[in-house]
Image (cartoon, rainbow, N blue to C red):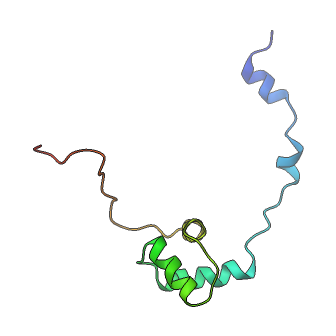
Amino acid sequence: MVGTTRACRSSAPVASAVHHRPAGEIAGNLGLMALIDRRFGDTALLMTWHLTKDGHAGNPKRVRRLTRLMSRVPVCRRPNISRPPKGR
């Protein structure tokens, strides 16, 4: 019987992991990223509204994904509303 660590070391890498190359972002997404960068302070829903008002296609999931891809994160902490405040 071979241990798990030894078995994992001896196995060959999966072909999809070796041959996969990330395709990168399409030009449309790069344009949206520039618009999102200009209005970074807005929430994803508000940013989606502005994009659709200006004639761009987008939804909140796409806006959040592109914002994460640009490594844009808010500086302040998010409120933890699932716990009651101290003193209650």
Check the image and report above or below for 18 versus 31: above
Q: Position of residue 14 (x, y in %)?
A: 85, 41
Query: Does residue 1 appear to the left or right of 37 in the view shown?
Result: right
The one nearer the camera, 65 or 81, is 81
Q: Position of residue 47 (x, y in %)?
A: 49, 78
Q: Position of residue 29 (x, y in %)?
A: 68, 78
Check the image and report above or below for 5 versus 18: above
Q: Quadrant of residue 64?
A: bottom right
Query: Does residue 13 appear to the left or right of 57 in the view shown?
Result: right
Query: Does residue 74 appear to the left or right of 24 in the view shown?
Result: left
Q: Quadrant of the C terminus?
A: top left
Image point (57%, 83%), residue name: 52
Which residue ends up furthest to the bottom in the rendered image?
54
Which residue ends up furthest to the left in the rendered image?
87
Query: Does residue 23 appear to the left or right of 70 in the view shown?
Result: right
Which residue ends up furthest to the top in the rendered image?
1
The one nearer the camera, 26 or 52, is 52
Image point (81%, 9%), residue name: 1
Check the image and report above or below for 29 versus 17: below
The one nearer the camera, 74 or 18, is 74
Image point (88%, 53%), residue name: 19
> How many circles with numbers are drawn on the protein?
0
Check the image and report above or below for 62 versus 46: above
Image point (74%, 82%), residue name: 27
Q: Quadrant of residue 12?
A: top right
